[in-house]
Image (cartoon, grey):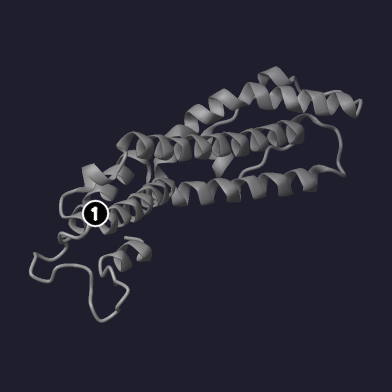
Amino acid sequence: MPRSVRMSMSCPGPNRRQPCCDASRPAGVIGAKPRARMCSIRSKLGRQARNSAIFLASNCGTIWAITKFARGFAPITGGMVNDLIDWENVASAVESVGQSERRSLAGHVRTILEHFARLETSPAVARRAGWQDTVSRARADIQDLLQSSPSLRPTLETAVAEQLPRALKLAASALARHSETPCVPLDGLRYDVNQVVNDWFPQL
């Protein structure tokens, strides 16, 4: 649980010697307080809850994040988690994080496939090292994404299949700009997930 959420459990009032939570109540249950104070607590917890859900989604995957998030906040709110949180907005925020990560993954996959095609079809020699460096950087970015969001791993195969036509089109445009004739037909190139993520490069 984020540190800011743990800290909110103590609820220090203006007088730091007098906690605002009712000590006679069970641990983790917010005591009865003036309406303004309770509204402030609810608003604060609501913001923390939304931020925590987004944090968990970016690191653990959408479905797991919501489940973990709900379980973590229930003790703090004394079972009032459903009243404190706008679940529709939380789900929307979490899904937005997931979509952003999938777009990022697709972009890195497309970059790798495009440079695979250049390495395999371009007669140029001087630029090959730079293309390999680009592939290595994109692979590192993919590994970072998969480490923070393991739920993206099953989407890799689909990403490769969807991005290959776009990558080949980009490679063809690059060859044309340099007035280069492909050494092999671009439309016959095929690559798989293992080639994309592992230490593999096509040979001319």
Residue appearing at x 48%, y 30% in the figure: 157
Q: Which quarter of the image is occupied by the C terminus?
A: top right
For label 1, the SS is helix
Residue appearing at x 22%, y 58% in the figure: 34
Task: Indicate the quadrant where residue 113 lies.
Answer: top right
Residue appearing at x 17%, y 63% in the figure: 28
Quick one: label 1, few (<14), some, or many (20+) residues within 10 Å?
A: few
Residue appearing at x 45%, y 51% in the figure: 148
Q: Which residue is mark 1?
A: 35
Q: Position of residue 135 (x, y in %)?
A: 67, 44
Which three-letter amino acid code belongs to the residue tagged 1? Arg
Residue 202 or residue 43, whichever sits in front? 43
Q: Position of residue 149 (x, y in %)?
A: 43, 46
Q: How many marks?
A: 1
Regarding residue 180, the answer to whether it shows in the image is no
Regarding residue 6, the answer to whether it shows in the image is yes
Q: Which quarter of the image is occupied by the N terminus?
A: bottom left
